[in-house]
Image: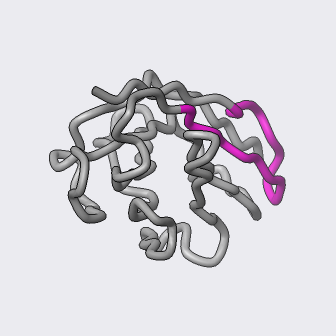
Amino acid sequence: QVQLVESGGGLVQTGGSLRLSCAASGRTFRRTAMGWFRQAPGKEREFVATINWSGNIQYYADSVKGRFTISRDNAKNTMYLQMNSLRPEDTAVYYCAARQSEQPTSRGASNYDYWGQGTQVTVSS
């Protein structure tokens, strides 16, 4: 079992930055691929970024590539999403997610088994 808690959301102006954190508990965290997803009002949940268990492989949605950076610190059982050059269209609830142990990275939300409660990110124009 992996339990996830996001933090770091808030209100920021266009062009600003935020760093989201996802604190994980559970013995399997270090062998777990993880990801960030987001859901805006009236829209489906969409992939943002994913990282493998060792942290050396990352994939991003085209809409955030070059602006967002996913990383993890296995010693602290924490994953991060550094978000720069934020735009109003980045406004959404952001969720962190984890796969079962030993599974590879994935862009598909249905492949993730554990989810956090979400943190709101609002970018004002």
* Side of 107 relative to 111 (left or right): right
What is the x, y in percent for residue 116?
42, 27
Residue 57 appears at what percent x and percent y?
44, 75
Q: Is residue 59 left or right of residue 12?
A: left
Q: Position of residue 113 (x, y in %)?
A: 21, 37
Q: Nearer the viewer, residue 113 or 15?
A: 113
Q: Is residue 118 above or below residue 79?
A: above
Considering depth in this image, is 30 or 80 the residue closer to the camera? Answer: 30
Looking at the picture, the colour scheme in use is: one colour
**Magenta highlight on residue 13:** yes
**Residue in view at x 45 percent, y 37 percent:** 95
Q: In the drawing, does residue 38 fall left or right of residue 88?
A: left
Magenta stretch, residue numbers: 8-23
Where 18 falls versus 62 (above or below)? above
Main secondary structure found in the magenta portion: strand
Residue 76 lies, in percent from the top left, at 63, 41
For the point 35% across and 34% down, the residue is 42
Q: Quadrant of residue 71?
A: bottom right
The number of numbered discs placed on residues in the rendered structure image is 0
Residue ID at (40%, 24%): 3
Quadrant including the N terminus: top left
Q: State the residue at coordinates (55%, 40%).
A: 77
